[in-house]
Image (cartoon, helix red, strand yellow):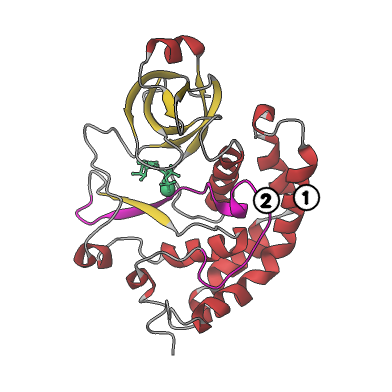
Amino acid sequence: MPLAIEQVRRMRGGAQSQLMHCEDGAYYIVKFQNNPQGTRILVNELLGARLGARLGLPIPAAAVVEVRESLVEHTEDLVIQLGRGRARCQPGMQFGSRYPGSPADTVVHDFLPDEQLREVVNLGDFCGMLAFDKWTCNTNGRQAIFFRAKDESRYRAQMIDQGFCFNAGEWNFPDAPLRGLYPRHRVYESVRGIESFEPWLARIESKITEAVLDEVYSEIPPEWLGFDHGAIEKMLEQLLRRRKLVRELIVSAWKSSAQPFPNWG
Ligand SMILES: Nc1ncnc2c1ncn2[C@@H]1O[C@H](COP(=O)(O)OP(=O)(O)OP(=O)(O)O)[C@@H](O)[C@H]1O
Ligand SMILES: [Mg+2]
């Protein structure tokens, strides 16, 4: 488990995450247990990252990052801004999403202009990610980061922010046609029909088993779950059943007024 040794900077966004340097030499975007979106988003992030990786989706490596009290005490910026006041970031086990390389060498973008977006090396992964977001009922729009790896001239996308999968802290699945789509529909230009999603649908059904869910569940730090293990077990059972629903959910996105797939006839 990586140990945080230094805070680098605050990140934008509702969870008020922090870029942190860890003892293993890597950098992580850390979301704290007492973030304003609730502790369950840490569970969602870890589950999302582990399950996405099983499906071969480009999600940054995820880890449980330890932040010790002494670091919080000595770092003025390790605070959560609340409506009126502020609270110190709670020490202990947090969620970390690995930064690609180091911030000094790699520039990370939240958005790309259309021209460069079309050239992204792994643009097809947005289809896989949509299948994932439909399956997990991500109630936020899909979010990605873009960067150039050392030996590549084109941008690569990684999928970030799984905090609102399973409907954030609700752990229910209020499906709706436009949920989980990437706001720039250009990324779905290659879609010609449901067959564009079939390889991903097949992976969800074959790679996600009860044993896999048990394994990722066992990795969640108990303090993220409080005393309520019933809620997550119920949610995971539903998730297992929902594997068969994804095809239908994608079709209803296609039929929606937003027409997210310009080339699906
Ligand atoms: N693995 C990563 N590598 C580099 N940058 C990252 C990574 N994960 C997140 N970020 C950056 O941190 C920002 C905040 O991350 P994220 O979207 O997960 O947090 P958030 O607080 O849930 O945001 P919001 O609530 O506004 O959607 C992102 O906009 C992105 O720029
Ligand atoms: Mg976000």
Q: Earlier in the sequence, mark 2 or mark 1?
A: 2
Q: CA distance from mark 2 to mark 1?
A: 9 Å
> Taking 77 as reference, is 115 above or below it?
below
Q: Amino acid at mark 1?
A: Lys
Instruction: For residue 3, say whether it is visible.
Output: yes
Highlighted magenta segment, given as a residue range? 152-179
Residue 50 versus residue 140: which sits nearer the camera? 140
Q: Is residue 109 magenta?
A: no
In the shown orientation, is residue 56 left or right of residue 24?
Answer: right
Instruction: For residue 26, say whether it is visible.
Output: no
Q: Main secondary structure of the magenta part?
A: loop
Quarter of the image where one finds residue 187:
bottom left
**x%, y% of residue 183?**
38, 65
Label 2 vs label 1, nearer the camera = 2
Cβ–Cβ below 8 Å for labels 2 and 1?
Answer: yes
Q: Secondary structure at mark 1?
A: helix
Q: Which residue is mark 2?
A: 171
Q: Which residue is mark 1?
A: 234
Q: Residue furthest right?
A: 230
Ligand 1 within 8 angstroms of badge 2 C-beta: no
Residue 100 versus residue 187: which sits nearer the camera? 187
Which numbered disc covers residue 141? Answer: none
Q: Secondary structure at mark 2?
A: loop
> Taking 192 as reference, is 179 above or below it?
above
Q: Residue at x 53, y 28 (%)?
A: 94
Q: Give the quarter of the figure containing the C terminus.
A: bottom left
Q: Residue at x 62, y 53 (%)?
A: 166
**x%, y% of residue 73?**
44, 11
In the shown orientation, is residue 263 left or right of residue 45?
Answer: left
